Image (cartoon, grey):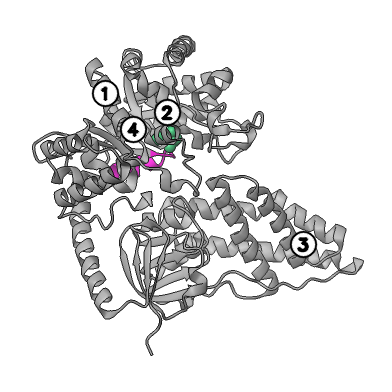
Amino acid sequence: MSAERFVMEGIGVSPGYAIGRAHLVDRRRIQIPKYHLPHDQVESELERLEAALAQSESQIQDVRDKLSDAGEEHGLILEAHQLMLRDEQLVHATREAIRADLINAEWALKKVIRSIKQLFDNIDDEYFRERRADVEFVGSRVLRNLLGTAQPNLSLVGPSAIVVAHDLSPADTAFLMRTAVLGFATDAGGKTSHTAIMARSLDLPAVVGLENISERVATGDMLILDGASGRIVVNPSPVELARYQRLQLEWQNRLAVITASRHAPAATTDGVPVHIAANVERPEETRTALEFGALGVGLYRTEYLYMNRETLPSEDEQYAAYRQVVEDAGPSGATIRTLDIGGDKFIEHLKRNRELNPVMGLRAIRFCLHELKLFKTQLRALLRASAHGRLRILIPLVSGVEEVRVVRALLQDCRDEVVAAGHAVADDIPLGIMIELPSAALIADVLAHEADFFAIGTNDLIQYMLAIDRGNEHVAHLYRPLHPAVLRVLAQVVAAAHAAGIPVSMCGEMAGEPGYIPVLLGLGLTELSMNTVSVPLVKSVVRAISMADCRALFSELSALVTTAEIERRVALRTQQLLKDLPLPELFSHAR
Ligand code: PEP
Ligand code: MG
């Protein structure tokens, strides 16, 4: 009897094909006993909790030790999990519940986990959804230790399995990678979930956000997983299997070529050089970015320095971070963006008033001009870092000329202060602006005489132009980078920068999508900054096309009036132009 064939669609977060048998890892549903304690058992119950916490900590330490060479990302996440085991909110509250409610440790812990998760539930933010998952992972590890049940037995997962789970903890993912699994498919998660980040850093194909694959697939089912399009074929036909095996082989061959050539310069076949830099969120990523072939840092999002902590980073701490980025970025230099919080980036201790519509609220440069002390601390740190390499300062969410002038004046004040304090500062620090508001885009010709460079942030520009909340999955299908209005504005901004003779780059996600590269080059961009993993592929894309073809494509598009027509034309032409490159599905993210 052959098993039923069906297809599931999720979010492809790490490209590549995995073909193999499913192994279901069930880490949900832990049945816990609930009972009341007599007074004289409270102490021994607290000891039982301590023992389970200690055991959990050493289990995580074991995984960390075994994976010490597997990259920093894992280490940091696992360390955060260990810290959580000492977290007051979790541990203290559980102890209190045992004492006050006279209930057993499992019950108390479960209650506390539930209340913490509810807190996170009220915050509609991807970052906090991930933290909610962390509490869940850590909590269930302690629960299992309290119950004396084994942690989900991942050692049963064989080397050629595709792991299917409701969700995977970072420790699970890290453990599984030693087993040489083929890929991951999970019910939960989004593009920036831990499983996604790790899968990408391990180069393992992964699909997340499948909603119920852990209920529909059983261990032993045959799976084809396409980590780019997010498609999973369960129990495929022999013909399908053969087709994907061929695709997989082609992909692997092409990937090997792409990776091997990551340090080769990116220039089109007709000799136009394209500058490919990386977006980084943490100073340590700068080195990795350069190893992936990036020419410097095109966007360092400093807000991450302010997150996950209760106090503001001091001037010295910021100086150390910015200095590291500038030094590690090498001769191409680093573009460091001033604090961009508010909107979807939420920092607990900087929360001022609750805003009904935070994306239109006190965000980014508006916030900084409102909190001058905080902003000037950052500017001073940046100025000091400028003495150590090539630094460019970038202002987010600029809406008009006034903000640029105010920031320039503040920079001058800060320069005077820093110099008076005896620090070295570079003579020339270009001050650029993000073009991510329609107002700024429309007066780009004016702004080009105020700013030293432009960085186009399409993530926000599209959000504000099309009125599509970039984090809202219900309107995600309407978030269309190839909308004719978006293309027209992009071309205008680039032309304005060229006319004024200032550099212009793009650092939104659009710049890292291979399928958009011919359009972006066609409208005149030759500087792109993107997530590190996209760098080698985008460089290969650039090397495979001619500027003349890209320009011809872009002028063809100006005759088309609907987004769908433009998307179809771009997909068709791009496929023709890039037929030798691994582009399994164009615009999969636009679904
Ligand atoms: C953008 O808006 O495109 C951008 C690069 O900034 P962020 O994603 O950090 O808002
Ligand atoms: Mg932005």
Q: Disc number at residue 503?
A: 1
Q: Nearer the viewer, mark 1 or mark 3?
A: 1
Q: Which residues are magenta?
A: 280-291
Q: Residue at x 15, y 54 (%)?
A: 579
Q: Which residue is mark 2?
A: 337
Q: Position of residue 106 (x, y in %)?
A: 74, 67
Q: Position of residue 266 (x, y in %)?
A: 18, 40
Q: Nearer the viewer, mark 4 or mark 1?
A: 4
Q: Position of residue 552 (x, y in %)?
A: 14, 37
- Alpha carbon separation for disc pair 1 and 3: 59 Å
Q: Label 3 near label 1: C-beta < 8 Å?
A: no
- Alpha carbon separation for disc pair 2 and 4: 27 Å
Q: Nearer the viewer, residue 404 or 88?
A: 404
Q: Which residue is mark 3?
A: 108
Q: Disc number at residue 485?
A: 4
Q: Earlier in the sequence, mark 1 or mark 3?
A: 3
Does residue 238 show up?
A: yes
Q: Is mark 2 within 8 Å of ligand 1?
A: yes
Q: Position of residue 380 (x, y in %)?
A: 48, 19
Q: Is mark 3 within 8 Å of ligand 1?
A: no
Q: Quadrant where the N terminus lies?
A: bottom left
- Alpha carbon separation for disc pair 4 and 1: 23 Å
Q: Secondary structure at mark 4?
A: helix
